[in-house]
Image (cartoon, rainbow, N blue to C red):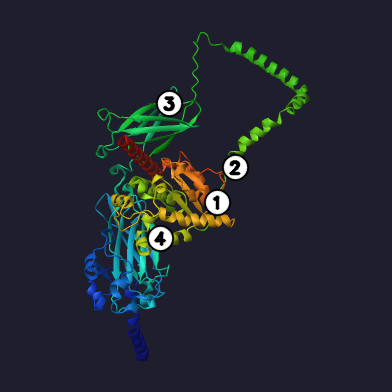
Amino acid sequence: MWKEALVLCQLLTLGRPLWAQEDPATAAVTPQDCNLECVRQGGPGCEYCRITRADVEKTLGFRSIEAFGSCVPWPCFELLGEEDPEVCQHYVHAPNDVTVEVLHDQNPKSDTIVVSWKPSYYGIAFLRGFQVSLQALGGSYVACQLFLFHRNLSLPASHAERVYKSDPFPGLSLGSQYAVTVMALPVPEQWERFYHSKIFSTRSCAEKNGLEKCKKDWYPEHIELQQKGTDIIVTFNLAPPSLDIRGYFSLCYAKGMKKYMDIKPNPTKNKTHHSYQLHGLQEGTNYTCEIAADLVDAVRKKFSVRVIHLQQEAALPLTTRPSLALMIPLGLALVAMFVILLAVLTRRRPNLWMKKLEIKPDIIEQHQERSTQQEVMSLPSNRLTPPRLLICYCSRDGPAHVRAVMQLGAFLQQHMATQVCLDLWDSLSLAEEGTMGWHCRRIRESDFVLVICSRGLRSQPSHPDPEGDEEEADEELGWGSNTSSSAAAAAIPLIGEEVGRAKARGQDLSKYMAAVFEYSEETDIPAELGLVAHYTLTRDLPLLFSHLHGVALHRPGGYLKIEHISEEGFTKLPAGAALQWAICEAGMVLREKEHHSVEGGD
């Protein structure tokens, strides 16, 4: 008996080191407060350190861009490669299982997130740290954090199950999309698998604070309809007084007709509900109506309206109503007439069939055409990944034009099943590779290239001046002169060469497209792009969708209809309304500039 107990005790003693190794491997690793000098010397307590901007400035001797924090191009070579250059010359694969967690934030106008990931076991022995960058899709917000291991640390493959975390990223706008990129260090020059990107959305104001506390997300929840004659009385609940919403609007449409109405409730009469009348609606027609607060990009509440035909029969006086004695003979007479009519129709049945054969064929064809037009085509499902689209543009037309381009990219990414590549969303790679290098690689990797043509692109010199208008536009957007936000002029000769080469070889030219916004003209398209497809946005959004996904809008017996990219339907989406507003704003700015230039010339 004592021998079995001794063996069990020895097994438990030998098993303790194994248990001790499993616990730290599965626990999340958070950054430590340690300076860069400790990391470079390999001292104790510097296993996973956050590197501050002050440490980078002290070590390198220059100030980095405020938005990029402590992140610098090739941080391993710059910060750890002086003592031992071989430390930064190995391949390390991209991290896995990148997740975004929302933290508790008392600020009702923003969210705070923290990023976590697992390192790949490929090259984990040479892993020197991580770089985590965060970018806003459709905006200019950029933030970056740098984490390094000390130079003497070498992780085993078993530590690939460890979860590493970043520091919190605070102040993220609600209801916005962001792209987070986790990069493994070191980063060899010709290696494309050293980072992992993930797109996520922050919570909406309604999700975080409740609908009654969000002015932008509020919409009427309770709507009641009542018909009075041919008019419809609509009653809806008003916004809380704390939101300070004083005006509303209603929009009804059917069969190409639209009815718009401004609504100005009187808060002194009723603070909770308001009623208004819809006039001039056609009987028997189904209307789709929307009601929303009179705010930019407000959420709209939809409801259906149908005017029912009311048959008003005047009640006869009791003295004039027919008696039962008179109704019985009348009923018998009607039955006799029905029997006689049935006999006549039975005899004339062959003649009726002959007349049916005389129906004209064109009437049948028109009926068939009307019925087949209601068929709807389905999109092909054999594509595993969305098409990759590179958008090139020119910022010489000012920040309003750049905002329109960014809103277009956000709409294509969210609602047209397209993976959009835009230089403003990839500023870190742009700074590392350079403008021409970045665009050459993206043109080669993308399935399609869309050039947004404008007056500034047409008048762009062959060698843009880095100190000219582009820098001023970038500064207005908050980027500064170190980040290029426009390289369409530099990419035009490259695209022109590719188009000419493909045309000479008889190859397909569908990869390249040119487009103008509604405030630009066809003459703004350069001659190098004269052979490619041209689109006017937002009018040609369905054609652009057809081009990107290779589907036909019309075919014999059917047509393709997608509600949120139609000429009227895309504005119902928040991203579509933002795109329309950005294009209108850019057009107003352009017309104002033309007006001032004319006055200056006079």
Q: Quadrant of the C terminus?
A: top left
Dot 3: within a 10 Å radius of its alpha carbon, few (fewer than 14), some, or many (20 or more) residues? some
* 4 or 2: mark nearer the eye: 4
* Residue at point 78%, 25% (across, down): 350
159 vs 410: above or below: below
Residue at the disc numbered 4: 436
Dot 1: within a 10 Å radius of its alpha carbon, few (fewer than 14), some, or many (20 or more) residues? few
Label 2 vs 3, first from the N-terminus: 3
In the foreground, 154 or 546: 546
Asked if residue 320 can be seen in this view, the reply is yes
In the foreground, 263 or 413: 413
Amino acid type for the residue under numbered disc 1: Gly
Residue 19 in the image, given as x and y percentages of width and height: 34, 78
Amino acid type for the residue under numbered disc 4: Met
Label 4 vs 3, first from the N-terminus: 3
Residue at the disc numbered 1: 550
Residue at the disc numbered 3: 227
Residue 441 in the image, given as x and y percentages of width and height: 44, 62
Label 3 vs 1, first from the N-terminus: 3
Element carrying mark 4: helix
Q: Are marks 3 and 1 in contact (CB under 8 Å)?
A: no
Label 1 vs 2, first from the N-terminus: 1
Asked if residue 382 can be seen in this view, the reply is no
Res 46 quadrant in image: bottom left
* Residue at point 35%, 77% (across, down): 155
Res 293 quadrant in image: top left
Q: CA distance from mark 1 to mark 2?
A: 16 Å
Element carrying mark 1: loop
* Residue at point 45%, 40% (across, down): 569
* 3 or 1: mark nearer the eye: 1
In the foreground, 446 or 273: 446
